[in-house]
Amino acid sequence: MKLIATKQGKADKYDSLRCIRKDGSETKTSMPRQGILPHDLIHYVVETALGYEYGFLGLVAKGSDIAFAMEQSHDVQNQKNVRQTIYAEAIVESLQAQLWSGDFNIDQFLVGLESACSIRGQNAPDLRSIYPQIDLYDAVLEFFERWKQVPFHGHIELEM
């Protein structure tokens, strides 16, 4: 799937994400500016780093409309969610808290992850095969630096 993240005008409060699936169908959404890398682009970093096929963007790639995939990944009552969908959302939420604090603390990250998963009725994922600070947090910061270089009305194209 191709992702086209477009930075809108300087005064705009939202940027946009357009997803074009391999079959040519597409869906799009607005991404609120939040002072850090947009939430949906953090999903890109997390899901590619962990090889998730059923995270938020994985659901979109498989044909879900973005609004439906977003609803599914945020619905704590939906026990039909696959674990990767829940894990991806929980990891992104915990990473966002770390990004807003301006520093990575592994203990706080793991507590946030445990809490976000628990709310969704799941145990936290086993992340022992990666280095969360390097593979997730630092990767998000690196991508954010790239995103900041995109001019207004410019875009980044990504492949999943």
Image: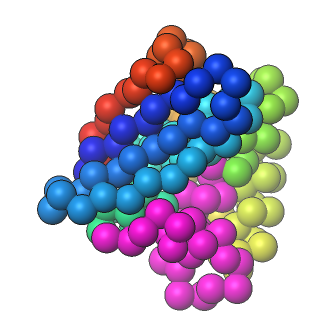
Q: Is residue 70 magenta?
A: yes
Say if residue 50 shows up in the picture. Answer: no
Q: Is residue 88 above or below residue 138?
A: below
Colouring used for the render: rainbow
Question: Within the image, what quadrant is residue 97 found in?
Answer: top right
| Magenta stretch, residue numbers | 63-92
Q: Give percent across and percent down for residue 111.
A: 80, 52
Q: Give percent across and percent down for residue 10.
A: 64, 20
What residue do we see at 80% from left, 32% from top? Answer: 100
What residue do we see at 70% from left, 78% from top? Answer: 76
Q: Is residue 95 above or below residue 115?
A: above
What residue do we see at 43% from left, 21% from top? Answer: 154
- The secondary structure that most of the magenta stretch takes on is helix
Name the side, left or right, on which 123 lies relative to 109. Answer: left
Q: Is residue 150 magenta?
A: no
For the view shown, which residue lies furthest in the left direction?
A: 23
Q: Give percent across and percent down for residue 98.
A: 76, 35
Question: Within the image, what quadrant is residue 44 found in?
Answer: top left
Q: Is residue 58 above or below residue 157?
A: below
Question: Within the image, what quadrant is residue 157 found in?
Answer: top left
Q: Is residue 142 above or below residue 58?
A: above
**Which one is nearer the viewer's eye here, 122 or 98?**
98
**Which one is nearer the viewer's eye here, 72 or 154?**
154
The count of marks equals: 0
Say if residue 27 shows up in the picture. Answer: yes
What residue do we see at 60% from left, 87% from top? Answer: 79
